[in-house]
Amino acid sequence: MSPEPGYKVIAKRVQTELAAKIPQEWRLGSDLLDLKQKDVTRIPAKSGILSQDELLITQTDATGILAKVHTGEWKAHQVTLAFCKRAAIAQQLVNCLTEICFDEALKLALWQDEQFAQNGGKVVGPLHGLPVSIKDHVNVTGLRTTLGYISWADNIPSQDAIYVKTLKKAGAIIFVKTTMPVTGMAIETVSNLWGRTTNGFNRDLVAGGSSGGDGALVESLVPSMVSTASVHLDEGLVMMGLQQAYEGLEEYPRDGHWDEDPSVMRMSWEPNPAVAEKLSIGILGFDGVVMPHPPILRGLREAAKKLRAAGHEVVEIAPYQHLRAWEIAYPLYYATGAKEIKANIAAGDEPWFPAIEKLHQNPDLKELSAKEVYNLQAAQDEYRGEYLRYWNDTVKLTSTGRPIDALLCPINPCASYPHDFLTWWGYATQWSLLDYPGIILPVGFADKDIDLKDTTYKPINNQDQENYDIYDPILWDKAPISLQLVARNLEDEKLLAIDLVGSVYQGGEGWYEVGGTLAYRELCRFPPPISTRLSPDSELNATLNVVLGYSVKLKGILNSLGMSGVPSIVPPLHLVLHNSFDIPAEYHETLRRNELKEVTLEGDIQPDEHYLSLLNPSSRATVAIPQLSQSIIKLNLGHFTWGFPIGFLSTLGELLPDLKCLRLYRQNITGPNADTRRDAQQFLYRIPDLVDLYLSDVHGDPDFFIGLGKAFKRPGQQGLVILHVEYTFEDDIDDFILKLPIPELRELIHPAIADLNFNMNPKPSKPRGIVPWPPSGTPGILEALLGDTTAPQRLKELSLLRVAIRLERPDIHLVTLLAILTLCPTLQAVEIVTIPSILDESHNQVMNGPNRNPRILLPTLDDVRIVAQSCPNLRRVYTNFSRVPSFGTAHWYKEDGVWKGGIEIPENPIDFTVNQHM
């Protein structure tokens, strides 16, 4: 047997020494250490090691701890003991520590309690009694500082780092040091010396970096005030629980260290900076390099919605040359070509980890000359100046008369990632290069049922492709989602004063004190969607009351979502855009009025000019759209034959978070290229509260409607209730209606839809497309929509089916409509709305004149009984013409097992052709 490599011998020694510092009574049983268990966040509560009081203490944030210790309600020793236990549990589960100093911490805590008692309740400092963790690379006297290098295994400093001195002087109690990646330059915390730190929510995912040990400790709900919650945080992911350490961050910068630390600016901390009550927060979702995963994008949307609800203004911000920032920063990170890093690895004779090796063995990495460093620093200064002007120019986008107060954006393109994957650093490096402060805000958790992979997205570069390929909703399920809030240079105090944690945080799990009782709160995800399904248990009550097509329950749903039809104080605004997509300034004030409910935008741009303008690179600039009122719930967009410029639709979506009714007509929604298609996806796929969707002569690229249908079926979609699809074939542009997306339209149907209408009327002069019912009588539309004659089985929860078809053959009208019903065996109620064509002479003869006989278009009792043989749950059939009862109706309903009702034809009917023109 060959001898064990030297680096493994050293690693085993230091790890054994570390493990020996965990008391036997704090060790977990083998059942709790099962490596197959991925989510270990609940084990501290189940272990029996922590009392209920200790669970409550370790769930309390830093401010709460200090308040209770400084008033004497809790003892410093009591608090420190609880955190030492919890850290010991965390180390056994996720391997997050490099040093343990429990004994020293508990002795110091006892001394503080004695001083507190002897001095009449006077604390030794503002952080008296607060346990804190310190990251491995920060010097603490007598404790290892290793940066994960084997060759540094026994590096024990003889003096404290300056801010460790500050923490100790303030009364903080250092009880552990935490892991970091070897070299310190990686986004996964792993080293040969200390092993791999894992994510407590899913140990198949990383804990981030370079502060992954602190992040993992925070997952275990241990307040870590250093690094993890740094004001200038640019160190990667904080997976959850920053609320533990958010407050009190100002303690270090307010103390003033410029006489000891030359890196500290001689600038006093401003304790109470002026912050407006109504903030303008910028939202940046995609940096133009690597598209964030669905949980991150959803987290941004939810955060934006909560900010608006809190009374703040939210403005979408486009990225400004973020790839350029990376291209400046990366060589500056490694100005020496990483030769010191490589030398330290070689000194320990240790192997590289894949992701870290990929970063440090990059062939583009080289030692820079003095001139090259100078040029990069000059490029940095130039970029910082440009970005400052770019930020200041946001004053044109806000309604406050000032630029955005802060920018909310991803800290990383993913909520975590699998081990040994090199993720994109750009979302963090951007602000390091600019020297902009940032804090991390937890906003919720990934959900495999909501955060589905966007199969329509096309990555734009290799890194984007790698990030796209790695995403798996199941693997990421329950991973905490965090965002970063960024302010301009030297606005640290303002950033902390803004304090948006409460505005965007969605909740967590753990022990909480409720009414004096300790209770465990389960994982709190985003609010569940409003249920819009029409319950079959209601029998003939509200669910099956289908007079004129809307059930009472459906009306209740619409009322609850703010679509009750109550007229707005401000009439609907109708704008026609003639020469560009910029909304004229004279309408901006009206668009901001809080009472405005409905807006219509129509295009009147020459087709050729319209198409060429969308292909022009200059169209990539953000279109001028003013701030819109949050009261707008209905949007109509029409006659934009070739689509919209990039950013137009997604900007509308951001500005209208409460949109409930969308009407699109006469347009190619996906536009001429991949960028315009992506913009349409960002708009349509992600309207959370859409209730009513109307598509008339709307076309798109292949598979677009399939993706749209999948979006509607996600649990996070608040509940599409009404779906109307219509193709009139009236547009004179041949290419515009070259192909109907009939095979895709079936994907738009889902069980929660209560009102479904597919209306297709090919004109004889426009034979392209699919005729709903061929002369053979085959129910072609349902076959086309649902794929085959067995697919309607999927509609078993559809309680209301409305079919509106203009037919050229009245003689086959009734037969084919009833044939469709036999394909839907689980129907309970159906309304058939017949819209005869006023252009068809045979229909006119049936509906008007001396030989008028609309009965031939209405089902008899025998017809209904035949249908009921295939639809045993059928309870009601209501048939009408254009929803006008005076044209004639057939109303059949089942009561006590017996079919009742009849056909009603008025003696003096309204002339059909007259009404159609009303």
Image (cartoon, helix red, strand yellow):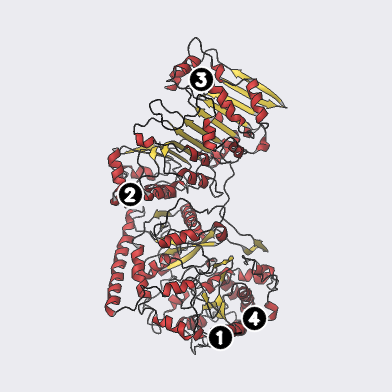
Q: CA distance from mark 3 to mark 2?
A: 49 Å
Q: Which residue is mark 4?
A: 22
Picture coordinates of residue 598, whole percent (x, y): 42, 39
Picture coordinates of residue 794, whole percent (x, y): 60, 40
Q: Residue furthest front?
A: 1
What is the three-letter code of the residue carrying label 4? Answer: Ile
- Using residue 26 as the reference point, say whether residue 372 is left or right of it: left
Q: Foreground mark, 1 or 4?
A: 1
Q: Which residue is mark 3?
A: 810
Residue 111 in view (yes/no): no
Task: Find numbered disc 3 in the image and state the secondary structure of the residue it sits on.
Answer: helix
Could you say which quadrant of the image residue 162 lies in? bottom left
Dot 3: few (<14), some (14–19), or many (≥20) neighbours within 10 Å? some
Of callouts 3 and 2, which one flags the residue occurring earlier in the amino acid sequence? 2
Q: CA distance from mark 4 to mark 2?
A: 60 Å
Instruction: Please name whichever residue, 611 or 100, is drawn nearer the observer in this view of the structure.
Output: 611
Q: CA distance from mark 3 to mark 1?
A: 89 Å
